[in-house]
Amino acid sequence: MIKNWKKSLLSGCLGVIVPFSFSANAQGQANTDIQDKALSKQRKVESDLLADNVNIGFKELAVDSILLQMALNKENLLYLADELYDESWNTTYVKAYSEMNIPETYTIDVSGFVMPIEGRITSHYGPRRRRFHYGTDIKVRTGDTIYAAFDGKVRVKRYERRGYGYYLVLRHPNGLETVYGHLSSFLVDQDQVVKAGEPIGLGGNTGRSTGPHLHFEFRLLGQSINPEEIIDFNDFCAKDDLYVFNKSTSGKHYRRSSSSKSSSASKYTAAGDDKIKYYKIKEGDTLGAIARRHKTTVGKLCKLNKIKSTTVLRVGRSIRIV
Protein backbone atom coordinates (compact mmCIF):
# COMPACT_ATOMS: atom_id res chain seq x y z
CA MET A 1 0.00 0.00 0.00
CA ILE A 2 2.89 2.35 0.86
CA LYS A 3 4.63 1.57 -2.47
CA ASN A 4 1.43 2.35 -4.48
CA TRP A 5 0.96 5.59 -2.55
CA LYS A 6 4.56 6.53 -3.27
CA LYS A 7 4.21 5.74 -6.98
CA SER A 8 1.04 7.85 -7.20
CA LEU A 9 2.62 10.77 -5.43
CA LEU A 10 5.78 10.64 -7.54
CA SER A 11 3.73 10.50 -10.75
CA GLY A 12 1.83 13.54 -9.55
CA CYS A 13 5.06 15.35 -8.70
CA LEU A 14 6.72 14.60 -12.04
CA GLY A 15 3.50 15.24 -13.96
CA VAL A 16 3.70 19.00 -13.30
CA ILE A 17 6.45 19.25 -15.92
CA VAL A 18 4.20 18.35 -18.88
CA PRO A 19 1.81 21.36 -19.30
CA PHE A 20 4.47 24.06 -19.81
CA SER A 21 5.42 25.24 -23.34
CA PHE A 22 7.61 28.38 -23.81
CA SER A 23 10.24 29.59 -26.27
CA ALA A 24 13.57 27.74 -26.20
CA ASN A 25 15.39 29.75 -23.50
CA ALA A 26 12.36 30.56 -21.41
CA GLN A 27 11.14 27.00 -21.71
CA GLY A 28 14.53 25.62 -20.73
CA GLN A 29 14.77 27.85 -17.65
CA ALA A 30 11.16 27.22 -16.68
CA ASN A 31 11.60 23.48 -17.06
CA THR A 32 14.77 23.62 -15.00
CA ASP A 33 13.03 25.55 -12.21
CA ILE A 34 10.05 23.25 -12.25
CA GLN A 35 12.24 20.16 -12.36
CA ASP A 36 14.21 21.49 -9.41
CA LYS A 37 10.99 22.06 -7.49
CA ALA A 38 9.64 18.66 -8.53
CA LEU A 39 12.89 16.97 -7.54
CA SER A 40 12.85 18.81 -4.23
CA LYS A 41 9.25 17.73 -3.62
CA GLN A 42 10.07 14.18 -4.71
CA ARG A 43 12.96 14.00 -2.25
CA LYS A 44 10.73 15.30 0.52
CA VAL A 45 8.06 12.70 -0.27
CA GLU A 46 10.68 9.95 -0.38
CA SER A 47 12.13 11.19 2.88
CA ASP A 48 8.70 11.20 4.52
CA LEU A 49 7.92 7.73 3.19
CA LEU A 50 11.26 6.43 4.37
CA ALA A 51 10.58 7.88 7.83
CA ASP A 52 7.14 6.24 7.81
CA ASN A 53 8.67 2.94 6.80
CA VAL A 54 11.27 3.17 9.53
CA ASN A 55 8.66 4.10 12.14
CA ILE A 56 6.36 1.30 11.03
CA GLY A 57 9.31 -1.10 11.06
CA PHE A 58 10.25 -0.18 14.63
CA LYS A 59 6.64 -0.40 15.78
CA GLU A 60 6.22 -3.80 14.13
CA LEU A 61 9.53 -4.95 15.57
CA ALA A 62 8.52 -3.78 19.04
CA VAL A 63 5.15 -5.52 18.79
CA ASP A 64 6.79 -8.68 17.46
CA SER A 65 9.32 -8.62 20.31
CA ILE A 66 6.57 -8.26 22.92
CA LEU A 67 4.52 -11.04 21.35
CA LEU A 68 7.60 -13.27 21.13
CA GLN A 69 8.43 -12.67 24.79
CA MET A 70 4.83 -13.38 25.79
CA ALA A 71 4.92 -16.60 23.78
CA LEU A 72 8.21 -17.63 25.38
CA ASN A 73 6.89 -16.87 28.86
CA LYS A 74 3.76 -18.90 28.15
CA GLU A 75 5.84 -21.77 26.81
CA ASN A 76 8.08 -21.67 29.88
CA LEU A 77 5.00 -21.99 32.09
CA LEU A 78 3.48 -24.76 30.00
CA TYR A 79 6.69 -26.76 29.77
CA LEU A 80 8.27 -26.03 33.12
CA ALA A 81 11.92 -27.06 33.15
CA ASP A 82 10.99 -30.09 31.03
CA GLU A 83 14.59 -30.87 30.11
CA LEU A 84 15.62 -30.91 33.77
CA TYR A 85 12.65 -33.06 34.82
CA ASP A 86 12.69 -35.25 31.72
CA GLU A 87 9.14 -34.09 30.92
CA SER A 88 7.79 -35.80 34.06
CA TRP A 89 4.74 -34.33 35.78
CA ASN A 90 3.71 -36.26 38.90
CA THR A 91 0.63 -34.89 40.65
CA THR A 92 0.78 -37.13 43.73
CA TYR A 93 4.07 -36.89 45.60
CA VAL A 94 6.41 -34.12 46.77
CA LYS A 95 9.56 -36.22 46.34
CA ALA A 96 8.52 -37.76 43.03
CA TYR A 97 11.80 -37.01 41.25
CA SER A 98 14.44 -37.83 43.85
CA GLU A 99 15.65 -40.80 41.77
CA MET A 100 16.45 -38.66 38.73
CA ASN A 101 19.98 -37.64 37.82
CA ILE A 102 20.67 -34.49 39.83
CA PRO A 103 23.31 -32.18 38.28
CA GLU A 104 26.43 -31.51 40.33
CA THR A 105 25.82 -27.75 40.00
CA TYR A 106 22.90 -25.78 38.63
CA THR A 107 22.52 -21.99 38.49
CA ILE A 108 19.02 -20.84 39.39
CA ASP A 109 17.55 -17.42 38.64
CA VAL A 110 15.71 -16.36 41.80
CA SER A 111 15.40 -12.66 40.89
CA GLY A 112 11.61 -12.94 40.60
CA PHE A 113 11.16 -14.24 44.15
CA VAL A 114 8.19 -13.02 46.20
CA MET A 115 7.90 -13.85 49.91
CA PRO A 116 4.95 -16.26 50.46
CA ILE A 117 4.17 -14.38 53.67
CA GLU A 118 6.15 -12.02 55.87
CA GLY A 119 6.56 -13.50 59.34
CA ARG A 120 9.11 -14.68 61.84
CA ILE A 121 10.74 -18.08 61.66
CA THR A 122 9.38 -20.50 64.25
CA SER A 123 11.41 -23.54 63.17
CA HIS A 124 14.48 -23.79 61.00
CA TYR A 125 15.56 -26.27 58.35
CA GLY A 126 17.58 -29.19 59.75
CA PRO A 127 17.47 -32.02 62.32
CA ARG A 128 14.54 -31.82 64.70
CA ARG A 129 14.17 -34.43 67.43
CA ARG A 130 13.93 -37.85 65.71
CA ARG A 131 13.45 -36.62 62.18
CA PHE A 132 14.74 -34.10 59.68
CA HIS A 133 12.81 -30.89 59.02
CA TYR A 134 13.03 -30.17 55.28
CA GLY A 135 11.64 -26.65 55.31
CA THR A 136 11.39 -23.40 57.22
CA ASP A 137 8.31 -22.73 59.37
CA ILE A 138 6.94 -19.19 59.25
CA LYS A 139 4.48 -17.85 61.80
CA VAL A 140 1.01 -17.10 60.38
CA ARG A 141 -2.54 -16.67 61.60
CA THR A 142 -5.20 -19.01 60.31
CA GLY A 143 -6.70 -17.38 57.24
CA ASP A 144 -3.61 -15.31 56.30
CA THR A 145 -3.06 -15.18 52.54
CA ILE A 146 -0.16 -17.23 51.19
CA TYR A 147 1.43 -16.15 47.89
CA ALA A 148 3.30 -17.96 45.10
CA ALA A 149 7.06 -17.49 45.42
CA PHE A 150 7.65 -17.46 41.63
CA ASP A 151 5.74 -17.79 38.40
CA GLY A 152 4.81 -21.43 38.03
CA LYS A 153 2.24 -24.18 37.83
CA VAL A 154 0.46 -26.20 40.52
CA ARG A 155 1.87 -29.74 40.40
CA VAL A 156 0.40 -31.16 43.62
CA LYS A 157 -2.75 -30.16 45.50
CA ARG A 158 -3.48 -32.66 48.26
CA TYR A 159 -4.26 -33.34 51.90
CA GLU A 160 -1.94 -35.38 54.13
CA ARG A 161 -3.35 -36.04 57.61
CA ARG A 162 -0.09 -37.03 59.31
CA GLY A 163 2.19 -34.66 57.48
CA TYR A 164 1.72 -31.50 55.42
CA GLY A 165 -2.04 -31.24 56.00
CA TYR A 166 -3.51 -29.29 53.09
CA TYR A 167 -0.52 -28.51 50.89
CA LEU A 168 0.57 -27.35 47.45
CA VAL A 169 3.64 -28.01 45.33
CA LEU A 170 4.45 -25.52 42.57
CA ARG A 171 7.01 -26.07 39.84
CA HIS A 172 8.77 -23.04 38.40
CA PRO A 173 10.52 -22.26 35.09
CA ASN A 174 13.84 -21.81 36.94
CA GLY A 175 13.82 -25.52 37.91
CA LEU A 176 12.88 -25.08 41.55
CA GLU A 177 9.78 -26.50 43.18
CA THR A 178 8.24 -24.87 46.25
CA VAL A 179 6.08 -26.55 48.90
CA TYR A 180 3.44 -24.80 51.03
CA GLY A 181 2.20 -26.90 53.94
CA HIS A 182 -0.44 -26.80 56.74
CA LEU A 183 -2.83 -24.59 54.76
CA SER A 184 -6.43 -24.12 55.87
CA SER A 185 -7.74 -23.92 52.30
CA PHE A 186 -6.71 -23.66 48.64
CA LEU A 187 -7.15 -20.70 46.30
CA VAL A 188 -5.85 -22.46 43.17
CA ASP A 189 -6.57 -25.65 41.24
CA GLN A 190 -4.47 -28.59 40.08
CA ASP A 191 -2.35 -27.70 37.00
CA GLN A 192 -3.25 -24.01 37.29
CA VAL A 193 -0.65 -21.52 36.04
CA VAL A 194 0.09 -18.78 38.60
CA LYS A 195 2.19 -15.63 38.70
CA ALA A 196 4.69 -14.68 41.40
CA GLY A 197 2.83 -12.96 44.25
CA GLU A 198 -0.54 -14.43 43.29
CA PRO A 199 -2.64 -15.76 46.24
CA ILE A 200 -2.57 -19.57 46.27
CA GLY A 201 -3.91 -20.53 49.70
CA LEU A 202 -4.73 -19.52 53.26
CA GLY A 203 -2.51 -20.19 56.25
CA GLY A 204 -3.63 -22.77 58.77
CA ASN A 205 -2.82 -25.52 61.26
CA THR A 206 -3.69 -28.72 59.38
CA GLY A 207 -1.82 -32.02 59.35
CA ARG A 208 1.07 -32.63 61.72
CA SER A 209 1.22 -29.16 63.24
CA THR A 210 1.23 -27.73 66.76
CA GLY A 211 0.10 -24.24 65.79
CA PRO A 212 -0.73 -22.04 62.79
CA HIS A 213 2.30 -21.69 60.52
CA LEU A 214 3.43 -22.06 56.93
CA HIS A 215 5.83 -24.91 56.25
CA PHE A 216 7.84 -23.67 53.25
CA GLU A 217 10.30 -25.73 51.19
CA PHE A 218 12.61 -25.33 48.20
CA ARG A 219 13.45 -28.45 46.20
CA LEU A 220 15.34 -29.25 43.02
CA LEU A 221 14.56 -32.66 41.51
CA GLY A 222 13.36 -33.72 44.94
CA GLN A 223 16.51 -32.63 46.83
CA SER A 224 15.69 -30.14 49.56
CA ILE A 225 17.45 -26.81 49.89
CA ASN A 226 17.60 -24.77 53.06
CA PRO A 227 15.36 -21.72 52.37
CA GLU A 228 17.77 -19.61 54.42
CA GLU A 229 20.43 -20.18 51.77
CA ILE A 230 18.22 -18.27 49.32
CA ILE A 231 16.03 -15.93 51.41
CA ASP A 232 17.00 -13.04 53.65
CA PHE A 233 14.35 -13.42 56.35
CA ASN A 234 15.15 -9.99 57.81
CA ASP A 235 14.15 -8.17 54.64
CA PHE A 236 11.89 -10.88 53.14
CA CYS A 237 13.67 -11.02 49.78
CA ALA A 238 16.15 -13.14 47.84
CA LYS A 239 19.75 -12.64 48.91
CA ASP A 240 20.92 -12.48 45.31
CA ASP A 241 19.52 -12.71 41.78
CA LEU A 242 21.20 -16.08 41.24
CA TYR A 243 21.52 -19.11 43.51
CA VAL A 244 24.08 -21.76 42.61
CA PHE A 245 22.83 -25.20 43.59
CA ASN A 246 25.58 -27.63 44.53
CA LYS A 247 24.58 -31.27 44.85
CA SER A 248 27.14 -32.01 47.56
CA THR A 249 26.57 -28.93 49.74
CA SER A 250 23.13 -27.42 49.07
CA GLY A 251 20.75 -28.23 51.91
CA LYS A 252 23.64 -29.22 54.18
CA HIS A 253 23.87 -25.85 55.91
CA TYR A 254 21.58 -25.46 58.91
CA ARG A 255 21.50 -24.22 62.49
CA ARG A 256 22.74 -26.61 65.12
CA SER A 257 22.06 -24.39 68.13
CA SER A 258 18.75 -25.15 69.87
CA SER A 259 18.68 -21.61 71.24
CA SER A 260 18.20 -20.28 67.71
CA LYS A 261 14.89 -22.00 67.04
CA SER A 262 12.76 -18.99 67.86
CA SER A 263 15.09 -16.47 66.26
CA SER A 264 13.93 -14.54 63.22
CA ALA A 265 17.44 -13.68 62.10
CA SER A 266 18.26 -14.20 58.45
CA LYS A 267 21.79 -15.46 59.07
CA TYR A 268 22.49 -19.08 58.29
CA THR A 269 25.43 -21.20 59.28
CA ALA A 270 27.57 -22.01 56.27
CA ALA A 271 30.94 -23.72 56.64
CA GLY A 272 31.06 -22.71 60.30
CA ASP A 273 30.45 -19.02 59.60
CA ASP A 274 27.54 -17.52 61.55
CA LYS A 275 28.42 -13.88 60.90
CA ILE A 276 27.01 -13.47 57.42
CA LYS A 277 24.74 -10.42 57.20
CA TYR A 278 22.77 -8.78 54.42
CA TYR A 279 21.31 -5.34 53.87
CA LYS A 280 18.22 -4.57 51.75
CA ILE A 281 18.94 -1.79 49.25
CA LYS A 282 16.69 1.26 49.57
CA GLU A 283 15.95 4.21 47.29
CA GLY A 284 18.95 6.57 47.15
CA ASP A 285 21.45 4.06 48.54
CA THR A 286 25.00 4.04 47.17
CA LEU A 287 27.86 1.65 47.87
CA GLY A 288 29.67 4.47 49.68
CA ALA A 289 26.70 5.25 51.92
CA ILE A 290 26.13 1.55 52.71
CA ALA A 291 29.82 1.09 53.48
CA ARG A 292 29.86 4.07 55.86
CA ARG A 293 26.64 2.95 57.58
CA HIS A 294 28.03 -0.50 58.27
CA LYS A 295 31.61 0.59 59.02
CA THR A 296 33.21 -1.15 56.07
CA THR A 297 34.65 -0.13 52.69
CA VAL A 298 33.36 -0.09 49.14
CA GLY A 299 36.20 -2.42 48.17
CA LYS A 300 35.11 -5.02 50.73
CA LEU A 301 31.47 -4.79 49.63
CA CYS A 302 32.52 -5.30 46.00
CA LYS A 303 34.64 -8.30 46.92
CA LEU A 304 31.90 -9.90 49.06
CA ASN A 305 29.24 -9.44 46.38
CA LYS A 306 31.49 -9.91 43.32
CA ILE A 307 30.46 -6.58 41.87
CA LYS A 308 32.19 -3.41 40.66
CA SER A 309 32.13 0.01 42.31
CA THR A 310 30.14 1.22 39.28
CA THR A 311 27.47 -1.49 39.57
CA VAL A 312 23.94 -0.06 39.64
CA LEU A 313 22.21 -1.02 42.89
CA ARG A 314 18.69 -2.42 42.51
CA VAL A 315 16.16 -1.24 45.08
CA GLY A 316 14.68 -4.13 47.04
CA ARG A 317 17.60 -6.47 46.47
CA SER A 318 19.96 -7.52 49.24
CA ILE A 319 23.68 -6.94 49.43
CA ARG A 320 26.03 -8.83 51.69
CA ILE A 321 27.79 -6.53 54.17
CA VAL A 322 29.72 -9.07 56.34
Image (cartoon, rainbow, N blue to C red):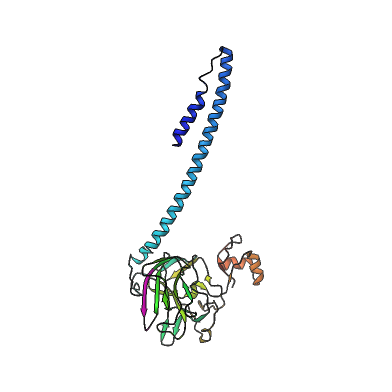
| Residue at the image point whose x is 53% and y is 86% from the top | 259
Give the vertical position of 267 relative to 40 (above or below).
Answer: below
Q: Position of residue 163 (x, y in %)?
A: 38, 82
Q: Main secondary structure of the magenta part?
A: strand
> For the view shown, which residue lies furthest in the bottom direction?
129
Report whether residue 94 is seen.
no
Report whether residue 49 is seen.
yes
- Residue 181 falls in image quadrant: bottom left
260 or 233: which is nearer to us? 233
Region in magenta: 154-163
* Quadrant in the picture for the N terminus: top left
Report the label total. Answer: 0
| Residue at the image point whose x is 43% and y is 79% from the top | 184
24 or 113: which is nearer to us? 24
Q: Is residue 235 magenta?
A: no
> For the view shown, which residue lies furthest in the top direction?
23
Q: Position of residue 252 (x, y in %)?
A: 45, 77
Give the vertical position of 56 relative to 4 (above or below).
Answer: below
Q: Is residue 59 left or right of residue 86?
A: right
Q: Position of residue 73 (x, y in %)?
A: 42, 59
Q: Position of residue 183 (x, y in %)?
A: 43, 78
| Residue at the image point whose x is 57% and y is 20% from the top | 32
137 or 241: which is nearer to us? 137
| Residue at the image point whose x is 46% and y is 46% from the top | 60
* Quadrant in the picture for the C terminus: bottom right
132 or 78: which is nearer to us? 78
